[in-house]
Image (tube, rainbow, N blue to C red):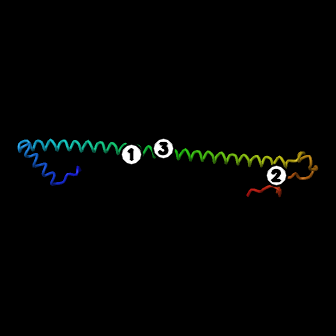
Amino acid sequence: MFGISGGELFFIAIIALIVLGPERLPKVTRFAGLWVRRARAQWYSVKDELERELAAEELKRSLHDAQDAMRDTEQKIRDSGAEARREFDDLRNAVANRHTDETPAAPAEAETPPGSPTPSISEDRSDEPRNA
């Protein structure tokens, strides 16, 4: 972890035994082990917290991207709906204009002589489109 080899550790242990003596060395090693465990636990705690924050940030970014995509899709749908409505209105106006152009000035009842059959609505007119 710190780049200390086995030989260096052995050298540190010999120096600690000489300086501290055999009575205090076990207490000092337990105390040092306790602090090392606490430092590791603190490091892992900080590391886990950072990972959670990064995951939350990534999730927020992903959610924001999804919202943007939904807004774009919604706008496209609205645009296509408006375009379809315009086309429908244009078609309806064209049909209405065609019917006003084909309507005779005088009513049809006045033109037919009495006693002749009246034309039905289902008569075939060659100039009108047929729906199948």
Closest to the observer: 116 or 41?
Answer: 41
Return the mark for residue 21: none
| Residue at x 5% of width, y 42% of height | 23
- The answer for how far apart the CA atoms under marks 1 and 3 are is 14 Å
Q: Work out whether mark 1 precedes mark 2 in sequence or the reverse, and give the earlier one.
A: 1
Along the line of sight, the residue nearer the viewer: 25 or 3: 3
Residue that appears at 61% across and 45% down: 78
Crowding near the residue tagged with mark 2, few <14, some 14–19, many ≥20 C-alpha atoms within 10 Å: few
Number of numbered tags placed on the structure image: 3
Q: Which residue is mark 2?
A: 121
The residue identified by callout 1 is: 55
Q: Quadrant of the C terminus?
A: bottom right
Residue type indicated by callout 2? Ile
- Label 1 sits on what residue type? Ala
- Which element is circle 3 on? helix
Name the foreground residue: 24 vs 116. 24
